[in-house]
Amino acid sequence: MVLIIGGYAQGQLEYVRQRYEVTDRQVFSACLPDTARDQEESQNTQTEQPIVIQDFNVWLRAEILAVEKDSETLIFEQLQRKLEDLLRRYPNVILISDEVGNGLIPMAREERILRDLIGRTQVYLAGQADEVIRVICGIGQQIK
């Protein structure tokens, strides 16, 4: 698994297209392959070819909001199980996620919790990743 991070509109997808030579059919936006296309096409993505999930932070946000748990720990544990399943099914996945922890601290409690959970998830994913690359101005800097 490869984790690509960076600020909004910093050229992460373009960087991935050039470095890994992926096609449009391998790129999914803010969703998992199984939910994006019909079952037959989804099965075709489970090959040695990498799949790319861009806007992964948007998917994470939707998953966090869908959970009906009050405890951040329980939400994170449930999210972690989903991610383990994702990585098991798609070991060659390339995840593109905006950095969400920089900047102003949100005033609303719910927004702070979302930001913190997405950040914790990115830390978890970085630990699982074979490579972690930060893209700034379209230039990739390998972190791991």
Image: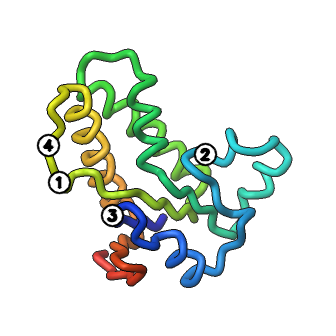
Task: Report the Cα–Cα distance between label 3 and label 2.
Answer: 21 Å
Q: Which of marks 4 and 3 is nearer the N terminus?
A: 3
Provide residue 14's location: percent of width, then percent of height. Answer: 54, 75
**Vertical relation: 141 (above or below) 67:** below
- Residue 123 screen position, x and y as percent: 27, 54
Q: Label 4, label 2: how many angstroms apart (C-alpha)?
A: 29 Å
User: What label does residue 7 carry, if any?
Assistant: 3
Labels 3 and 1: the sequence-earlier one: 3
Amino acid on which the number 4 mark rests in the picture: Ile
For the residues labelled 4 and 3, the Cα–Cα distance comes to 16 Å
- Image quadrant assignment for residue 76: top left
**Horizontal and vertical percent for residue 60?**
42, 41
Q: Nearer the viewer, mark 3 or mark 2?
A: 3
Q: Residue 49 occupies which quadrant of the picture?
A: bottom right
Q: What residue type is labelled 3?
A: Gly
Which residue is labeled 4 in the image?
Answer: 105
The residue at 31%/44% (across/down) is: 118
Q: Which sits earlier in the primary sequence, circle 4 or circle 2?
A: 2
Q: Do the residues labelled 1 and 2 touch (CB within 8 Å)?
A: no
Residue bearing the label numbered 2 = 32
Between the residue at mark 1 and the residue at mark 2, the CA separation in whole angstroms equals 28 Å
Taking the image as shown, residue 106 lies to the left or right of residue 140, namely: left
Residue 28 x, y percent position in the rendering: 63, 54
- 11 relative to 121, above or below: below
- Neighbourhood count class around disc 2 (C-alpha, 10 Å): few under 14, some 14–19, many 20 upward: some
The image's mark for residue 103 is 1
Quote the CA–CA distance across marks 4 and 1: 7 Å
For label 4, the SS is loop
Residue situated furthest right in the rendering: 40
Q: How is the image coloured?
A: rainbow
The residue located at (32%, 61%) in the rendering is 126
